[in-house]
Image (cartoon, helix red, strand yellow):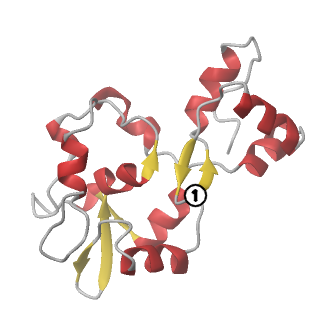
């Protein structure tokens, strides 16, 4: 794995080698104010469905690329997506992959089914995103997968 000056994995280089890489996926934190493409620790933790303390530990362990703005850490979407096992979003799909991820229990509660049913769906091929060893699911991927199996869901069922 490539490493940068801070002895952290160079996720930019890793991401650039991904087959779905497109250069506009890596916004510079210095371009303009860049704030629309930056996430705080709390926002990133909410996206991953992890605690902010866990995410700070991952930063300290060099498991996720972050940069400092004052005394706070910030993330780009490219560094967030590099931590999720799964395909990188294409340019036209960025918005759907900025949606907060769901845990199996979230899906079970929203659809009034058992967690075991969600686990069977995952076994049958429902797309997942592994985040630091935790199974998470993108709500749009879940919707597409279930609709492909003739299970009709209203838009935004996960909210």
Taking 14 as reference, is 52 above or below it?
below
Query: Label 1's element?
Result: loop
Position above or below: 125 against 147: below
Residue situated furthest bottom in the rendering: 71
Does residue 154 lie above or below 18 as drawn?
Answer: above
Q: Which residue is mark 1?
A: 133
**Residue beneath the point at 56% across and 32% down:** 140
The residue at 90%/41% (across/down) is: 114
Quadrant location of the N terminus in the rendered image: bottom left
* Left or right, residue 63 beside residue 1: right
User: Looking at the image, is 147 positioned above or below residue 83?
Assistant: above
Residue 139 quadrant: top right
Residue 33 in picture, x, y percent from top left? 15, 63
> x and y percent of residue 135 in the render?
63, 50
Q: How many marks?
A: 1
| Image quarter of the C terminus | top right
Instruction: Please identify the quarter of the rendering in which residue 34 is found.
Output: bottom left
Residue at 31%, 70% in the rendered image: 74
Residues 61 and 150: in front is: 61
Residue occupying image coordinates x 58% and y 73%? 51
Few, some or many residues within 10 Å of mark 1 (<14, 14–19, 20+): few
- Residue 101 point in image, percent of width and height: 57, 49
x then y, percent, for residue 22: 19, 34
Residue sitting nearer the eye, 99 or 53 = 53
Q: Quadrant of residue 68?
A: bottom left
């Amino acid at each position: 794995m490539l490493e940068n000056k801070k002895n952290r994995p160079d996720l930019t280089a890793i991401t650039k080698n991904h087959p779905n890489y497109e250069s506009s996926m890596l916004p510079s934190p210095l371009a303009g104010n860049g704030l629309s493409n930056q996430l705080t620790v709390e926002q990133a933790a909410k996206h991953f469905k992890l605690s902010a303390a866990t995410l700070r530990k991952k930063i300290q362990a060099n498991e996720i690329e972050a940069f400092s703005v004052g005394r706070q850490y910030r993330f780009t979407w490219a560094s967030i997506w590099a931590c999720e096992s799964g395909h990188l979003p294409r340019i036209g799909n960025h918005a759907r992959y900025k949606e907060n991820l769901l845990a199996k229990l979230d899906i079970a509660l929203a659809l009034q089914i058992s967690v075991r049913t969600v686990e069977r769906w995952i076994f049958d091929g429902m797309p997942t995103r592994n985040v630091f060893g935790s199974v998470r699911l993108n709500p749009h991927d879940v919707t597409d997968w279930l609709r492909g199996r003739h299970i009709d869901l209203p838009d935004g069922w996960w909210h």
